[in-house]
Image (cartoon, rainbow, N blue to C red):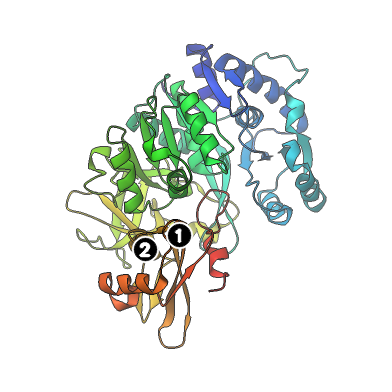
Amino acid sequence: MKFDTLDDLVSGSARRWPDRTALLDENGRRLSYQNLEAWVNAFSHRLAKLGAESGARVAILSRNSFESVAAYFALLKAGAVVVWLNQTLGAKDLGLVCKDAEISVLLCEEEFKGRAEKISEACGVKIEALNKFKNTPEENRNFKSFSRPEGLAAIVYTSGSTDKPLGVMLTHRNLLSNNEAIAAYLNLNENDRVCCVLPFYYIYGLSLLLSHVAAGGSVFMENRFSYPQAALEAMETQKVTGFSGVSSHFILLMNHTDFLSRKLPALRYFTHAGDKMPVAVTEKILKAFPRKPLFLMYGQTEAAPRISYLDPSLAGKKPASAGKALKNIEMKILKDNEAPCAVGEEGEIVIRGENVMKGYWNNPKETQKVLRKGWLFTGDTGYLDADGDLFVTGRLKQFIKVGGRRVSPAEVESLALGYPGVREAAVVGIPDETLGEKLRLYATEDVTQPVNTAALADFYKKKAPFYKVPAEIVIVAALPRNGQGKIDRKRLAGMKG
């Protein structure tokens, strides 16, 4: 089924599958497509009265919930631009985002009311509690859609090449084009049910919602992943057909649950994106679940979000690859002078397609840096092998210069993960008078198999050139993470050795 705007996803699925379950949560609640559409219409009437009109920027501060999903689609139907806020941030940082996006209304879950009030005081934003919408007096009559295919649907804030967060502007067409492609290669249908542990303010999490609603499938919102065993039990009882995460989600399941010994009979596939999956982790998943495809994917917020994926049949042969670009995306690797790279030659990953953002909100300078001649310069580095499969090697801004040589943190971390007892690893560069920078490796260890740092250093010396050997190795209880589950490298860099 083809859709013109994002709000069509709900109405289209409600017409085809009115009684099928659209949303489930960890508390046992279910919402059918027919009822979700009724909520969206009722919310749209209420939001229009609050000033959420065409073009207005409206923020959502909430965990994944029925109310936040209904509000999201209702805002889109009203023609508003959604700014989904990262609830792990404090009021000061959230206030900066709201001020930058010129938010007019903030829809808030009760749990975050205190932060919302501080934001309101600082920015003059109107607050409305999401829980008030559940029993809205508005009739559930149809609400005329004011959305347009090329209209702005969302501003998604992400960390860019500056210290200031960048607001990625995505249209209905950007998001629809990409999620249609995702649904196609995952072969999603109305019988699919994804376990969503990723927040919807994160573009990867949002893509799970959009692709499954488009297919008439179900989204099981699991907000308890800090208790991975409970999440794993729920995956089995709810008979989810898909599980998606960044590498830390898979590592937590491996280290703190009986995940690798489970059968998970209903589960059809796994997907990974958002960071580079350690090869050792990929190999463990493939060994434990040989008949369940693992899709290793690459993308970024500016691409709405998916750029490429590896054919699951190649995951065992090329566990470090992100595969080929989606059919509606062109991709090439360029040198610093923008000349094409040869096979196996590393350069910047550059793409174009309907999925590419309009630009950064109120930031033409940063927009011009990455959108050039119709192409998105991703800031990621990589190379194509002889088969045309992509290997992502790092970020242009994240490489560490050791004695003038560029070192990819991911490459050094991958070696550590192949050492007995190392559970997780992260590398940062620290100042060095001689080399300019040197490597510091932070690692967590298996309590049943402690890591000897001197022995690990010797292991590196045998496996890697001297400039890729960590000068310091620090064992820590846990690595700091952000709200998306990724390692927080800014906080890590501030940790003492």
* Residue located farthest toward the left when viewing the structure as drawn: 386
The residue labelled by disc 2 is 416
Q: Which mark is residue 445?
A: 1
* Image coords of residue 325 (percent x, y): 31, 44
Indicate whether 154 appears above or below 492: above
Task: Identify the mark nearer the N-term, 2 or 1.
Answer: 2
Q: Nearer the viewer, residue 414 or 184?
A: 414
Please state which of the two labelled residues, at mark 2 or mark 1, is closer to the viewer: 1
Quadrant assignment, res 342: bottom left
Whether label 2 touches label 1, CB < 8 Å: no
Q: CA distance from mark 2 to mark 1?
A: 11 Å
Residue 108 seen in render:
yes
Q: Residue at x 60, y 23 (%)?
A: 28
* Image coords of residue 71 (percent x, y): 65, 30
Indicate whether 273 appears above or below 64: below
Quadrant assignment, res 184: top left
Which class describes the residues within 10 Å of circle 2: few (<14), some (14-19), or many (20+)?
many
Quadrant assignment, res 313: top left
* Residue located farthest toward the right when viewing the structure as drawn: 121
Callout 2 amino acid? Ala
